[in-house]
DNA sequence: ACAGTTGGCGCG
DNA sequence: AAAGCGCGCCAACTGT
């Protein structure tokens, strides 16, 4: 059963809709302030809360301490169904674009991204005459008092959530594989809930430890506009080493490169791995400068003030933000948290982290996707022994070192054509013909300009118009060699994209099922018994273990110390469950490395 | 003056 | 060793 939530002017509409998509009762209209009460009262019924965008509604519920068990995010589901080849011959896919296609994701409330949309300098007239066709969903109760109600709303594109849900359920039913699409959409929506919950709870962040890390590396925080002391020192050493004037700005690539050329360093770019090959007194201070500069600009004091001012990093995930189905993030760089600041991620007193990551997720996914029994067997754990698939490939006698196994598999999945990875590929193809054939077929489909799909039915986009134009022009009578080679290179490039899409996208589906299962299992563990210290997380997670971070194939759970073992067990069980959901009884293992630790930095991966 | 691009590097 | 996938962010630079 679905409960479709909608804005009704007089309040908030709640409309029951059955799973086949038929009305299952009259719509009720309740006051905005009553929504959390309704959701809380409904907890036992496991209704699927159906709304235009999870971030339009769920943050307000969480702010009232209410968790929702299941959801259907119409915007996310619409995007999947419109593109999926499984649903290509359905009314939803065959119709022209609707307002749902142009709906932009709603940023989480209260964060810098939301605040940026509200800045007074965005006065009328400052917007571009033509945006990219996106419209912004109307503001909700979640935006209380923040003045978002005057965000632009395209009133010519009325969104009718109940009608859209009916259309989507019909498309699923009419698709070539309703079961897979149903699972995909449920997982996608569960991911949206998890992302909102992680934003709400936040990643525990010790500003004092972060400041310690920065001060140790860079010196004390400089005045605005000034360079930190250590950077200034290094800048001087760089200038000295190449006899450059004090006015040389090492942040200016053209200037620095020219000065280095004059000094005869012999660098043709400033890339780290190219500089490392050179032998010159400027190289050492320059590499050190670049490392510290990166820390200072990307994760320095400004980042701390903006993204973790109050002991929590509230990361802004963009569910489905990557074409393959992986999450993206906006602001704060949640998915690029460098290892050298992870020491600042420290559990609350009496609490701990359970950090889990899936070992060699992508090759295991490939083995299962291709139903390659021999490859799956190489990754299977025997008597709890090795959890390392690459070691298993060596034991199976396919290649002679772990490094070769790894480079070969990465090359197969990414489309590498050079070096060790290309040398090893024939051996892999002989040992694991189904797996290699699957990625090769995906690459060739892409080269023909066709779509490819993941296990659960997320399909790749088609190449843009300019792609076809270049392909066409290569067939012209008078096409020059350069045009033809450009076309060939473009063809291979799209093939590498589709080759990787099936693996990366299916791995993303596994991860989505994994976190969906984790969040359900963690909630089922129940409340902390009295006597243990409550954490600093807001309700409804103050006395419960909860997800605080997700990174493609890795999760961090913040848990009362007493529950760490139980949480570890559930996280492992969830990985097994995700494997079965995607691949049924195909014998593939998804082992995790799990660490119970007070600091994220101590979780060795 | 402003928006978009580039080079480089962080993460998986 | 540094090209083969997917991203976001920063500062400097380029184009208008």
Image (spheres, coloured by chain):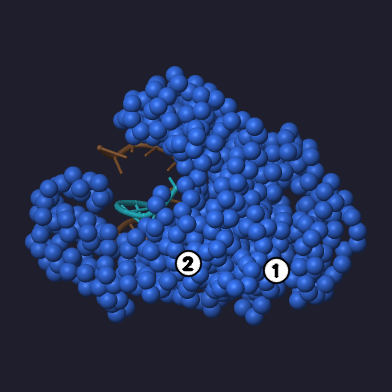
Chain colours: A blue, B cyan, C brown
Q: Residue at x 54, y 55 (%)?
A: A565
Towards the viewer: A164 or A487: A164
Quadrant location of residue A210?
bottom left
Q: Which label sits on residue A21? A: none
Residue pointed to by mark 2: A347
Task: Report x, y in % for residue A222.
Answer: 28, 77
Q: Is residue A522 above or below residue A93?
A: below
Quadrant location of residue A493?
top left
Towards the viewer: A203 or A193: A203
Q: Give the CA separation, mark 2 to mark 1.
A: 23 Å
Q: Residue at x 56, y 47 (%)?
A: A572
- Of all chains, the one bearing label 1 is A
On the rendered structure, is A117 left or right of A63? left
Residue pointed to by mark 1: A66
Q: Residue at x 19, y 58 (%)?
A: A286
Task: Report x, y in % for residue A378.
Answer: 47, 29
State the SS at label 2: loop
- Of all chains, the one bearing label 2 is A
Q: Is residue A16 above or below residue A187?
A: below
Task: Report x, y in % for residue A229.
Answer: 22, 73
State the SS at label 1: loop
């Amino acid at each position: 059963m679905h409960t479709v939530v909608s804005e009704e002017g007089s309040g908030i509409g709640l409309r029951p809709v059955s799973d086949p998509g038929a009305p299952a009762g009259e719509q009720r209209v309740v006051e905005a302030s009553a929504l959390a009460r309704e959701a809380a009262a409904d907890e036992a019924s496991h209704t699927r809360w159906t709304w235009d965008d999870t971030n339009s509604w769920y943050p307000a519920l969480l702010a009232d301490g209410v968790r929702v068990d299941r959801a259907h995010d119409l915007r996310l589901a619409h995007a999947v169904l419109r593109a999926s080849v499984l649903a290509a011959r359905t009314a939803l896919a065959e119709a022209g674009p609707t307002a749902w296609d142009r709906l932009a994701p709603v940023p989480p409330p209260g964060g810098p991204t939301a605040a940026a949309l509200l800045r007074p300098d965005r006065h009328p007239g400052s917007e571009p005459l033509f945006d990219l066709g996106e419209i912004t969903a109307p503001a909700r109760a979640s935006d209380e008092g923040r003045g978002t109600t005057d965000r632009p709303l395209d009133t010519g594109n009325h969104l009718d959530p109940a009608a859209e849900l009916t259309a989507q359920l019909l498309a699923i039913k009419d698709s070539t594989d309703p079961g897979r699409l149903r699972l995909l959409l449920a997982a996608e929506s569960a991911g949206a809930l998890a992302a909102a919950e992680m934003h709400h709870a936040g990643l525990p962040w010790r500003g004092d430890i972060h400041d310690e890390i920065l001060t140790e590396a860079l010196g004390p925080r400089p005045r605005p506009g000034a360079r930190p002391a250590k950077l200034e020192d290094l800048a001087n050493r760089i200038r000295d080493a190449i006899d450059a004037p004090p006015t040389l700005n090492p942040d200016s690539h053209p200037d620095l490169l020219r000065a280095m050329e004059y000094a005869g360093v012999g660098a043709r770019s400033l890339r780290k791995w190219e500089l490392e090959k050179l032998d010159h007194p400027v190289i050492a201070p320059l590499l050190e400068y670049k490392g510290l500069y990166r820390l200072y600009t990307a994760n320095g004091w400004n980042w701390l003030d903006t993204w973790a001012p109050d002991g929590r990093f509230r990361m802004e995930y963009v569910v489905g933000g990557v074409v393959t189905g992986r999450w993206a993030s906006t602001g704060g760089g949640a998915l690029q948290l460098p290892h050298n600041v992870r020491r600042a991620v420290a559990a609350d007193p009496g609490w701990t982290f359970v950090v889990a990551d899936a070992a060699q997720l992508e090759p295991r996914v490939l083995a299962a996707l291709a139903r390659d029994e021999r490859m799956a067997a190489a990754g299977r754990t025997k008597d709890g022994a090795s959890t390392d698939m690459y070691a298993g490939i060596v034991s199976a006698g396919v290649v002679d070192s772990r490094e070769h196994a790894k480079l070969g598999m990465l090359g197969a999945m990414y489309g590498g054509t050079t070096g060790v990875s290309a040398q090893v590929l024939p051996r892999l193809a002989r040992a694991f013909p189904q797996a290699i054939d699957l990625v090769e077929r995906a690459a060739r489909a892409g080269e023909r300009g066709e779509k490819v799909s993941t296990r659960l039915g997320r399909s790749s986009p088609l190449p843009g118009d300019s792609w076809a134009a270049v392909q066409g022009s290569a067939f012209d009578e008078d096409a020059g060699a350069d045009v033809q080679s450009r076309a060939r290179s473009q063809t291979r490039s799209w093939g590498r994209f589709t080759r990787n899409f099936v693996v990366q996208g299916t791995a993303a589906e596994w991860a989505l099922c994994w976190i969906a299962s984790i969040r359900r299992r963690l909630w089922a563990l129940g409340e902390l018994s009295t006597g243990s210290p409550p954490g600093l997380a807001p309700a409804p997670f103050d006395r419960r273990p909860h997800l605080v971070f997700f990174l493609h194939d890795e999760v961090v759970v913040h848990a009362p110390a007493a529950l760490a073992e139980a949480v570890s067990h559930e996280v492992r069980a969830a990985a097994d469950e995700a494997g079965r959901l995607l691949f049924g009884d195909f014998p593939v293992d998804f082992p995790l490395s799990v660490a119970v630790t007070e600091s994220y930095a101590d979780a060795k991966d």
